[in-house]
Image (tube, rainbow, N blue to C red):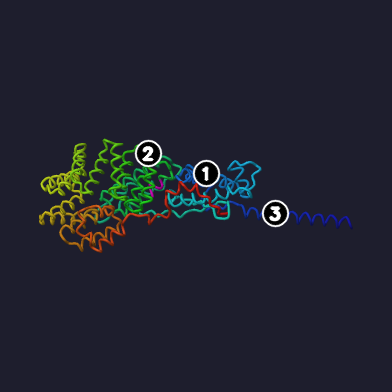
């Protein structure tokens, strides 16, 4: 009887021990199991990590790269219990086994830096990434979340109509949905984004329709290949003309220059952005430097001619515009600036001849029609100015015409109220030409109007949309942030 009781007691103890062991295992699994969002595989996480590590915030931060790789790999291996301060220091940072976390804050410091870098990536290059990886304060275990799919405008066909103009969509949802692992799409997406940005800058397409799509394509390109300089160039122009965010404009254009230091287009857009955002006197040395580096660049000479015209140094503007035309007689921008400069010198016959030549070369480019209407009006050629204004209104019923362009025609005819109303419409549409309002002499007639002053204050380039200063993304290595 006694032996039977002993056996029953031992079995009861084994059952309780087994139950306790199972409970501990279940608790550990609940505590340390990998909770990936639905539809996300470990391979997706690894690909996202590679995109993060290739970004500008991480590309020179070796220790942050090691830190992130280590904690994510442990998470995916179901070994979250090994994500501790000591193991991070020894296995990720290569510290000796004698490392004592109580004597060295290195892991806590690096954790703070890693959080900042992840936030930098999320706000900039990873703004449209499909996965979000965070490191919560008070923990070394990363959290992986699935970002809601970016809203892409849906169309019933591959065309969209705006103000009577049919705008072909040069890339469709099939391209936008290209997988990040398909490297071959990166350059194509970047070029298509840049093409649509260019169409907006030429005033032949509505910015509020194409710019958001171009931004999605450019960011998708960087997800495919973070070294695609043309994607950064497109994003720089989007932030300059559409978001009007000076910090991010500079950051993306600087990044494009780092990736393609000798690309003529990148250098010239950098100089042109400086002309718009930093003021004429500050921009001039930059533009002249580009011309020294690229002595045969038509764009560089055009930038210099434009700067001289804005500075009202019309003699120099004529000189550089003539050089542009000499290099490329079919380049209507050169004829335009030359005509505007002649007009400022009161050489009316030459001005009209150049502006009409520019219109013919550009196939009736609406901004040029408005410019010539303004010139006629200032020379008391009212009938000619009215005819051009009527032509602009007719064109606006057939295709997209910038509201700022039509505003200039009305302003020329003395209809200031209608001009301001059209400029307000241009603000609502985020018209690209608005960034030149403070530079163009043709708007001097309304520059003292309170409505115009208020309008300009709302479109002035600034950092009001920049949640961070991008320049700090590369210097936060110097900051010791003990957040744990």
| Mark seen at residue 260 | 2
Distance CA(mark 3)–CA(mark 1): 37 Å
Q: Are the residues tagged 2 and 3 within 8 Å (C-beta)?
A: no
Q: Residue lying farthest right?
A: 1
Residue assigned mark 3: 22
Where residue 376 sits: x, y (%)?
13, 53
Which residue is nearer to you in this view: 432 or 257? Answer: 257
Compared with 134, 450 (above or below) is: below
- Image coordinates of residue 81 in percent, x first then y, are 63, 50
Q: CA distance from mark 2 to mark 3?
A: 59 Å
Return the residue nearer the eye: 19 or 419: 419
In magenta, the rendered stretch is 216-220
Mark toward the viewer: 2 or 3: 2
Q: Earlier in the sequence, mark 2 or mark 3?
A: 3
Say whether disc 3 or disc 1 marks the residue closer to the N-terminus. 3
Q: Is residue 99 magenta?
A: no
């Amino acid at each position: 009887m006694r032996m039977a009781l002993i056996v029953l007691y031992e079995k009861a103890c084994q059952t309780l021990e087994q139950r306790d062991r199972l409970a501990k295992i279940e608790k550990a699994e609940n505590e340390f199991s990998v909770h990936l969002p639905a539809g996300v595989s470990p391979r997706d996480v690894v690909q996202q990590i590679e995109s993060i590590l290739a970004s500008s915030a991480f590309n020179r931060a070796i220790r942050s790269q090691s830190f992130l790789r280590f904690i994510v790999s442990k998470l995916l291996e179901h070994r979250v219990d090994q994500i501790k301060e000591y193991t991070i220091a020894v296995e990720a940072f290569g510290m000796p086994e004698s490392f004592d976390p109580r004597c060295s804050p290195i892991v806590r410091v690096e954790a703070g830096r890693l959080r900042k870098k992840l936030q930098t990536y999320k706000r900039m290059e990873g703004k449209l990434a499909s996965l979000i990886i965070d490191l919560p304060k008070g923990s070394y275990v990363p959290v992986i979340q699935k970002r809601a799919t970016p809203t892409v405008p849906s169309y019933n066909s591959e065309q969209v109509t705006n103000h009577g103009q049919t705008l072909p969509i040069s890339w469709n949802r099939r391209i936008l949905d290209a997988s990040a692992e398909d490297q071959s799409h990166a350059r194509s997406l970047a070029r298509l984004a840049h093409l649509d940005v260019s169409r907006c800058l030429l005033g032949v397409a509505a910015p509020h329709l194409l710019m958001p799509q171009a931004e999605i394509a450019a960011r998708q390109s960087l997800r495919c290949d973070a070294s695609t300089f043309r994607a950064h160039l497109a994003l720089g122009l989007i932030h300059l003309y559409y978001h009007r965010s000076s910090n991010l404009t500079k950051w993306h254009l600087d990044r494009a220059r780092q990736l393609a230091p000798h690309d003529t287009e990148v250098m010239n857009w950098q100089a042109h952005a400086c002309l718009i955002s930093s003021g004429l006197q500050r921009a001039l040395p930059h533009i002249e430097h580009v011309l020294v580096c690229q002595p045969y660049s038509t764009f560089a000479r055009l930038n210099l001619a434009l700067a001289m015209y804005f500075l009202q140094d019309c003699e120099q503007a004529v000189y550089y515009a003539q050089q542009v035309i000499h290099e490329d007689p079919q380049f209507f921008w050169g004829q335009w600036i030359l005509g505007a400069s002649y007009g400022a010198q009161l050489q009316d016959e030459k001005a009209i001849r150049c502006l009409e030549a520019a219109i013919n070369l550009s196939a009736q480019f609406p901004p040029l029609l408005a410019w010539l209407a303004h010139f006629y009006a200032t020379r008391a050629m009212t009938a000619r100015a009215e005819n051009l204004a009527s032509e602009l209104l007719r064109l606006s019923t057939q295709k997209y015409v910038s509201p700022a362009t039509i505003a200039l025609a009305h302003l020329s005819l003395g209809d200031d109220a209608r001009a301001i109303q059209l400029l307000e419409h241009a603000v609502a549409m985020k018209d690209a030409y608005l960034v030149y309002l403070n530079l163009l002499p043709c708007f001097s007639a309304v520059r003292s109007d309170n409505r115009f002053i208020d309008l300009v204050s709302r479109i002035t380039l600034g950092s009001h949309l920049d949640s961070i200063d991008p320049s700090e993304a590369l210097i936060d290595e110097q900051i010791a942030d003990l957040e744990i």
